[in-house]
Amino acid sequence: MAIHPAGFTVAAGGAANGRIWFWAGEENVHTANTPANCHDICLHPSGTALAVAGHTGAATVYTMFPAPAQK
């Protein structure tokens, strides 16, 4: 689990398939599927990248972009 610089929580886990959850307060605002169960995550200090270690021994780096501005 990690706290993003924008204030939301990022958590990862899963069973046969992995998941990354994004929480704002008590609300799950987004869930992303991963190819393998997640064992650990590391959030870049800038909040623009998330590294995920899977149970297969592979690590995947996800790039995160800010949400588009609301009009």
Image (tube, helix red, strand yellow):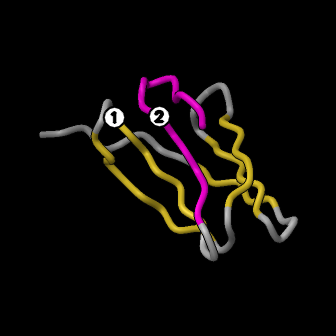
* Residue 24: assigned label: 1
Callout 2: few (<14), some (14-19), or many (20+) C-alpha neighbours within 10 Å? some
Magenta stretch encompasses residue 65? no
The residue sitting at the left extreme is: 71
- In the image, taking residue 43 as reference, residue 7 lies left or right, namely left
Which amino acid, by three-letter code, is at mark 2?
Thr
**Whole-percent x, y for residue 1 in the image:** 60, 37
Disc 1 is placed on an element classified as: strand
Callout 1: few (<14), some (14-19), or many (20+) C-alpha neighbours within 10 Å? few
| Camera-side residue of 2 and 49 | 2
* Residue 55: assigned label: none
- In the image, taking residue 44 as reference, residue 6 lies left or right, namely left
Q: Residue at label 2?
A: 9
- In the image, taking residue 17 as reference, residue 32 lies left or right, namely left
Cβ atoms at labels 2 and 1 below 8 Å apart:
yes
Relative to 5, say whether 58 is above or below.
below
* The image quarter in which residue 69 lies: top left
Which amino acid, by three-letter code, is at mark 1?
Ala
- Give the residue at x 59% y 32%: 2
Q: How many marks?
A: 2
* The image quarter in which residue 47 lies: top right
- Give the residue at x 61% y 69%: 15
Residue stretch in magenta: 1-14
- Give the residue at x 63% y 76%: 16
**Whole-percent x, y for residue 4 in the image:** 52, 29
**Upstream in sequence: badge 2 or badge 1:** 2
